[in-house]
Image (cartoon, coloured by chain):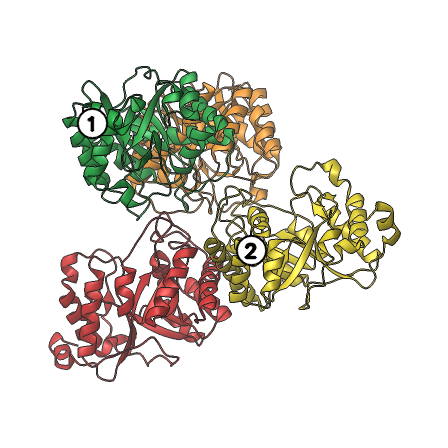
Chain colours: A yellow, B red, C orange, D green
Amino acid sequence: MSGAARRGSAGRLDGRVLDLNADLGESFGVYRYGADEALMPLLTSANVACGAHAGDPRTMRESVALAQQHGVAVGAHVGLADRAGFGRRMIPVTPVEVRDLCLAQMGALSGFLRAAGLPLAHLKLHGALYMMANADPGLAEATTAAVTAFDPDLAVFALPGSALGAAAAAAGLRVVEEYFADRPYRGAEVRMFGWTTADVGSPDDAAGRAVELLSDPVFGTVGTVCVHSDTPGAPAVLAAVRDRLLAAGCGLAAPHATAPLPRPAPAHRP
Amino acid sequence: MSGAARRGSAGRLDGRVLDLNADLGESFGVYRYGADEALMPLLTSANVACGAHAGDPRTMRESVALAQQHGVAVGAHVGLADRAGFGRRMIPVTPVEVRDLCLAQMGALSGFLRAAGLPLAHLKLHGALYMMANADPGLAEATTAAVTAFDPDLAVFALPGSALGAAAAAAGLRVVEEYFADRPYRGAEVRMFGWTTADVGSPDDAAGRAVELLSDPVFGTVGTVCVHSDTPGAPAVLAAVRDRLLAAGCGLAAPHATAPLPRPAPAHRP
Amino acid sequence: MSGAARRGSAGRLDGRVLDLNADLGESFGVYRYGADEALMPLLTSANVACGAHAGDPRTMRESVALAQQHGVAVGAHVGLADRAGFGRRMIPVTPVEVRDLCLAQMGALSGFLRAAGLPLAHLKLHGALYMMANADPGLAEATTAAVTAFDPDLAVFALPGSALGAAAAAAGLRVVEEYFADRPYRGAEVRMFGWTTADVGSPDDAAGRAVELLSDPVFGTVGTVCVHSDTPGAPAVLAAVRDRLLAAGCGLAAPHATAPLPRPAPAHRP
Amino acid sequence: MSGAARRGSAGRLDGRVLDLNADLGESFGVYRYGADEALMPLLTSANVACGAHAGDPRTMRESVALAQQHGVAVGAHVGLADRAGFGRRMIPVTPVEVRDLCLAQMGALSGFLRAAGLPLAHLKLHGALYMMANADPGLAEATTAAVTAFDPDLAVFALPGSALGAAAAAAGLRVVEEYFADRPYRGAEVRMFGWTTADVGSPDDAAGRAVELLSDPVFGTVGTVCVHSDTPGAPAVLAAVRDRLLAAGCGLAAPHATAPLPRPAPAHRP
């Protein structure tokens, strides 16, 4: 589909409802990390670190309280147990290990959610684990198995067209496909690595790109829009994205328990 | 009460039902610890480490599976986040920190229990945290608050006459008072530290002492009998205690949801 | 000694040479901590965390390079292996454990110093370990034994009148007594805990107090002045202290290999 | 070279001097690991874990003391900072990170060696880091750079024909090539993974294979023979290897400061 064709339909998201998510709760001990207080009021979903790659019990409690205060849905941001590498290093893990990581971390965060009277809403994998499980069917199935065993009502955040999304859908779980507002795209494919700030542009650029791409049928199955909390200027990016989505007629809400939309045929993908 | 009087009533525990517990699941990575396979078939309750002072996700999963195989109730063995010190060092903690430790660790273990279709049955604190929360009313209340928030049906293991037992009872929780079969006693008071193996004696000595003391009214409120998994010869001690309890007419079962027995007046305590 | 008498001699430190130190290198992984770049140019000694309570190999390397660039002497800031508590929790440790902590951490930092062609200049204990070893003769002797075994030319930073200073002096080590510019004093005794920012005052207040107290004979044995890197506004405090010391005629240099000055009699101490 | 030809020259190692090494000091906290007490008297070199993948300050101290008691040379067994994975997971690391790991860990162990009056004798990488740096020239050079900066008199243990051996030799360091007595070989190439105990055989099998292969010119540059401390029956394997080497006329000693032998031409390698 040409850029002109995209622009022809661009700018309107009337009737669409999207989730806005960010990764929060990544502080540890005396170390503060991320603009949680600034981001939380703008979100509909928060992915809270569970003490493995980041976070700790105090931070989990405080993050849940902050989310509760702003009416934001809380998901478990499950990562590799690699605090020194912040969960970003591709440490080889087996499917059984991934299932164990998911169960232990969803469980730990749920302790604080139960105490707050809130449900766990979704699972989002973090960093290297996100990339590995989106690409590897065995790790994708292990993630799905953990969610099914823990709570089959949880939504699973996944890349469009990913092994993780396929495994979760096959298991009857709710899949919420993710768009990254603070990353450049090459066609329908996000560039998670090897990009520059010039590729991403200003908050307005990011927000304009989000509306343009999300109004393209190729992104019609996307259910949630992410801004990373440690992107420089993350609150400004998130605010701009939020404003432009609302201006384009989009509703904002945490994912509902609805089946994923049918996907466009793979041929539409570049 | 004199030793003669005790011996007069000793040896019979007809109609009494006691729980037999041990601390398990304390391995970590390549490191194996404790005679879990030998102990589990003899227990009615297992206190499983939750990855803070000991244990890790794999060990939690394997411990839950082993308990399930033998029909043993599983409790969270919550400890200080002090792997280097195995949770035995008296690290100062605030009530809020204790509540956070309890919620995160009960939650993490519950992830594996949910996946196995088992309930979390009880909370037992570990090591230094056990000693501190049994003695300090603020930490006792924090522990109780965590249990109440997480699941008020959980039993709380506590020392007889402890601040922890009092706080849990005041909150309407089930308190299960604990007798330590592999520790010497001075009257009704366990000597957790500063004892020698001669003070404890052989497995038969430990088993005989257990039956004698538990048939004493001073110990009439005790609901569970502990053998530490890292006591030298723990399986033999546990087997001897189990045999003698059964021979004395005692039933063995994990704690039921019944109110604690009325306690003897404090004047009876040495 | 009255305030009037102190003020009579105050304001001049001609002929005195003092060291200016701060705790640096406390970052960890993605977590940044402390105003290292702003503080380093103003210091004569840097206490670099060694990867136990804070810091990691990369941070040690970067801290050594930054110190080298500014001609600042580097000491090992040895703390409890308590990253979650930043080394501030009073974890019980034995003398043998303290000796082990000192040897491992002085050694680790020395790896980077050797690669940079720099000597290790001093040992300063951190946080809870500093407080415990300054007060407890057994821990003080263990610290001293580690320094003697590792390198008897190292200086040992200690509180005036402390068990640590006494043990190090008895072992023939160089003791450098420490004054804390960002803490209030009650007579000759620093108040490490339980103070307010009002007690400390502005950077100018802190600098004025430093000159006034250090020109008092009671503080005549002090050899180094500390500003904590995580004190709010630490660079401004350090700059003010440095300016006022220089204006008062004081020289600034890392500790030299000279014997400690004779101490005033204990009766002078409040 | 045929097996017959090898057997023709087999059985005699007169005039050869080899080092016998094992990985020790891998305990952590309450967790014991490896048959250190049984192995140490049979070794000429011990590779002591430095607290990253295994070991801790107490274990380093005890390992150094045990080596000193038996006159065994001590090297730093440097691994990835991956205690949960025991340094066996292939975590991606950059050359700068490898240099940092080496400096911090050689330094930490050296703290205990200095206190014992012993020199650090060699560097041996552990587990995944050993495999990566033997294969990757960038990581090999980083390792070499760390040794050169720390102490250019250290020997570097490396696989024959490896990138690590080449980098160390190019830097003028002593390279000590390693033969693994408890692993099967395919020609001159060790099979570190995917072998069975049947491939390794009994202690006598392992000892016979060691003498046969080491008397082959292809292995003429080998300087040290390793038995892993966690191989089942490691002490029996090590004892058998040691006995057979001595019976074949081989001398046993830690590596001396001599240049590596010239290597056979690559064409000799299968």
Note whether residue D164 is visible: yes
Q: Judging from the image, what secondary structure is the residue with disc 2 in?
A: helix
Query: Residue A50 at what x, y percent from top left?
Result: 53, 55
Q: Can you say which quadrant of the picture contains the C terminus of chain C?
A: top left
Where A172 falls versus B51 (above or below)?
Answer: below
Q: CA distance from mark 2 to mark 1?
A: 53 Å
> Across the whole image, how many numbered discs are drawn on residues?
2
Looking at this view, name the residue that lies furthest to the bottom. B15
Query: Residue B105 at what x, y percent from top left?
Result: 45, 60
Residue sitting at 39 percent across and 79 percent down?
B257
Foreground of the two, C176 or A262: A262
Amino acid at the residue labelled 2:
Ala
The residue at which mark 2 appears reads as A140
- Does the residue at mark 2 contact the one at mark 1 (Cβ under 8 Å)? no
The residue at which mark 1 appears reads as D71
Q: Chain of mark 1?
A: D
Residue sitting at 42 percent across and 28 percent down?
D103
> In this rendering, would D67 be left or right of D77?
left
> In this rendering, would D96 be left or right of C168?
right
